[in-house]
Image (spheres, grey):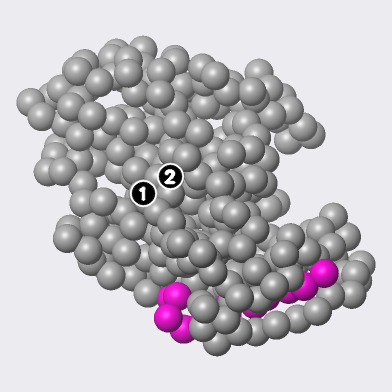
Amino acid sequence: MIPAAFEYHAPTSVAEAVSLLDRHGEGAKILAGGHSLLPLMKLRLAQPEVLIDLARIGDLAYIRRNGGGLSIGAMTTYTEIESSSDVQSAAPALGEAAGMVADRQVRNMGTIGGCLAHADPAGDLPAIILALGAQILTSSTGPHRTIPIDDFFVDLFTTALEHNEIINEIQIPALPAGTGTAYAKFGNKASHYAIVGVAAVVTASGGTCQSVRIGITGAGPKAVRATAAESALTGAGLDDASIKAAAQHAGEGIDFNEDVHASAEYRAHLTKLYTERVLLQAAARAG
């Protein structure tokens, strides 16, 4: 199908982009790669009056070390994240998750900022970004904000971003010594979207779990943390039995999606299964 008519802008600076957003209000949409928005526009499920393309803002594409952590510009592509030695060193599961997104063409164009702002309930990166405890830095015509990732995903395709805000940077904190990370998913064979995807960041000492964060995507209307499973594992041993017991709590509080790809019951089963798998892998990597 052909999208509805729209006005197109290609700003060359963040200041110009947020000014356009502020001027055109809620009828404007940001294009940050386009592999989520453009298909919706072709089906006329989304009909923005104004499209603001960030592709010409070179200052938004970068990966930098930041005190042992990472600062990632919003227009950094999946491919750049997957292939970055800094990502492999500081947050290897982020590179793994980026490498599981869709296909090579999408990974070459799709961006981390576009992914997070779109908040697709089956996207890969929201789970690992949640597990890593990142912060989202925004720009607008008003005060810039720093949004903790735990407060960012609000509902289906809905985030804490205001209509005149864009994501400027994603900051990932340094991981403590003895930390392992992992991401795995049960993906749709055609689209590669996560029917259920789970990320874990485990910090261990002496065979005991000192801290853990678990992010889940695909299961419900938004990416969430499995806080009940986290509580069950924190302070416990990282043996197979303890991890399996903790994983049984992974689905608590999730309103499971149900569609042609999987029933709610199947998603609940996958959530426990993949939580156990990534916890075992992250614990092994934690050493």
Q: Taking the image as drawn, is residue 76 in sight?
A: yes
Which residue in the structure is indicated by mark 2?
A: 149
The structure residue drawn at horizontal position 13% and vertical position 24%, both measured from the top left corner, is: 207
How far across and down, in percent of the image, does residue 199 sit?
41, 39
Q: Identify which residue, 208 or 191, lies in the foreground.
A: 208
Q: Which of the 4 image quadrants contains residue 245?
A: top left
Q: Which residue of the protein is positioned furthest toward the front in this rendering?
A: 142
How far across and down, in percent of the image, does residue 215 sit?
44, 36
Helix or strand or loop: what does disc 2 sit on?
A: helix
Q: Looking at the figure, which quarter contains the N terminus?
A: bottom right
In the drawing, does residue 39 fall left or right of residue 255? Answer: right
Q: Identify which residue, 37 or 278, lies in the foreground.
A: 37
What amino acid type is highlighted by mark number 2?
Ile
What amino acid type is highlighted by mark number 1?
Ala
In the drawing, does residue 97 fall left or right of residue 69? Answer: right
In the drawing, does residue 93 fall left or right of residue 219? Answer: left
- Which segment is the magenta one? 49-61
Q: Which label belongs to residue 134?
A: 1
Q: Which residue of the protein is positioned furthest toward the left in this rendering?
A: 206
